[in-house]
Amino acid sequence: MTAPAHLCYTIYQGATFRRRFRWCTAPYPVKLLNGKLVNAQTCRPVPPEDLTPVDLTGCKGRLQLRSDVLAPDVLLELTTENGRIDFSLGDGNIEFFLDAATTSGLPYGEAPPARWRTAVGQFEVAHPNGDVSRAAVISCSLDPEGTR
């Protein structure tokens, strides 16, 4: 199993949120070093030809953002079923999407679950054969809308 990526996003209240990443595997362990993907053992850059996009055909995705990974309350849920996760771009590309009306309605403040400023979640992919992969650990911050 490959270690999940660590992604950090800011959701701007009242603005469309659309973020993409490409999920690929390499034939050796890799890590991010100064924003670049490198071989974890040699620290040499990973050549593009060493990356194989994950086939997401027939997969379903899910992400539940919470104030803490173990918190019982879900602050925001993104799934392929609710249209907030899209695998249709192909070539291992994954897109997270929230429309402006949804982000405008996110409750900003210090008291989860009624209001929140930061959230964390684990993005999981359910494969057609029943396997589940944790593709990423995601941290989000909510930036309040001043223009209403």
Image (cartoon, grey):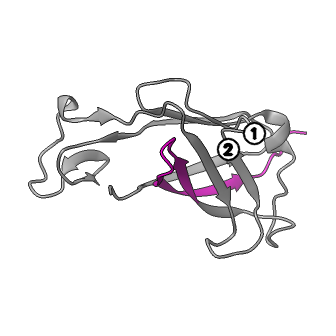
Secondary structure of the residue carrying tag 1 is loop
Disc 1/disc 2 C-alpha distance (Å): 5 Å
**Residue 147 appears left or right of 127:** right
Secondary structure of the residue carrying tag 2 is strand
Residue corresponding to mark 1: 82
Q: Position of residue 88 (x, y in %)?
A: 56, 25
Asked if the stretch drawn in magenta spans residue 124, the answer is: yes
**Which quadrant would residue 51 be assigned to in this image?**
top left
- Magenta extent: 122-148
Tell me the residue at 49%/30% (across/down).
Answer: 57
For the stretch drawn in magenta, the main secondary structure is strand
**In front here: 97 or 56?**
56
Q: Which mark is residue 79?
A: 2
Q: Quadrant location of the C terminus?
A: top right
**Which quadrant would residue 122 be assigned to in this image?**
bottom right
**Residue 18 appears left or right of 54:** right
Q: Position of residue 14 (x, y in %)?
A: 80, 39
Check disc 1 and give the amino acid type.
Answer: Asn
